[in-house]
Image (cartoon, grey):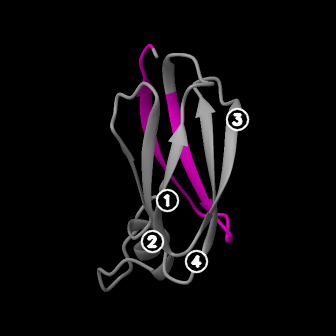
């Protein structure tokens, strides 16, 4: 979840909030059945992150490591039943970004 953006007296967002806007996770295709490609951009200065697949009950279904400030990773979905999931990327500073995914029948 992205932090709430608050404005300073001069109308500019603080550094942490700008970094949060630079933190992106895209999951394609969506919906998917067998695999997805997760494209990510981490906040400036981040080079490592963890990709977690979480179900709607908040249970972590799988976890993968990500290296580099930006990139992509193919994720095999065959072990996950059809449902809605969240892909949560957490960088080494604990900042997170997420994207929702629907898995349809394999």
Question: Earlier along the polypeptide chain: callout 1 or callout 2?
Answer: 1
Q: Residue at x 64, y 23 (%)?
A: 57
The CA span between labels 1 and 2 is 7 Å
Q: Secondary structure at mark 3?
A: strand
Question: Earlier along the polypeptide chain: callout 2 or callout 4?
Answer: 2
**Which is closer to the viewer, label 2 or label 4?**
4
Question: Earlier along the polypeptide chain: callout 1 or callout 4?
Answer: 1
What secondary structure is the stretch in magenta mostly built from? Answer: strand
**Which is closer to the viewer, label 3 or label 2?**
3
Q: Is residue 101 visible?
A: yes
81 above or below 93?
above
**Which is closer to the viewer, label 1 or label 3?**
3
- Do the CB atoms of the residues marked 1 and 3 lie less than 8 Å apart? no
Q: Which residue is mark 3?
A: 60
The CA span between labels 2 and 4 is 15 Å
Reply yes or no: does residue 84 show up in magenta. Answer: no
85 above or below 106?
below
Q: Residue at x 31, y 86 (%)?
A: 10
Horizontal and vertical percent for residue 97? 50, 55
Q: Which residue is mark 4?
A: 46
The residue range painted magenta reads: 85-105
**Which is closer to the viewer, label 1 or label 4?**
4
Q: Residue at x 50, y 18 (%)?
A: 83
Q: Which residue is mark 2?
A: 17
The CA span between labels 4 and 3 is 23 Å
Left-right relation of 104 to 78: left
Q: Residue at x 57, y 17 (%)?
A: 81
Tell me which corner region of the image, top left, top right, bottom left or bottom right, holds residue 33: top left
The tag on residue 3 is 1
């Amino acid at each position: 979840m992205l932090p709430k953006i608050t404005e300073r007296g001069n109308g500019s967002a603080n550094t942490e909030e700008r970094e949060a806007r630079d933190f992106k996770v895209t999951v394609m295709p969506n919906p998917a059945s067998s695999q997805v490609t997760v494209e990510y951009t981490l906040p400036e200065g981040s080079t490592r992150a963890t990709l977690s697949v979480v179900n709607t009950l908040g249970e972590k279904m799988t976890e993968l490591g990500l290296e580099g400030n930006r990139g992509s990773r193919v994720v095999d979905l065959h072990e996950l039943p059809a449902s809605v999931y969240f892909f949560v990327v957490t960088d080494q500073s604990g900042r997170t970004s997420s994207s929702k995914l629907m898995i349809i029948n394999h």
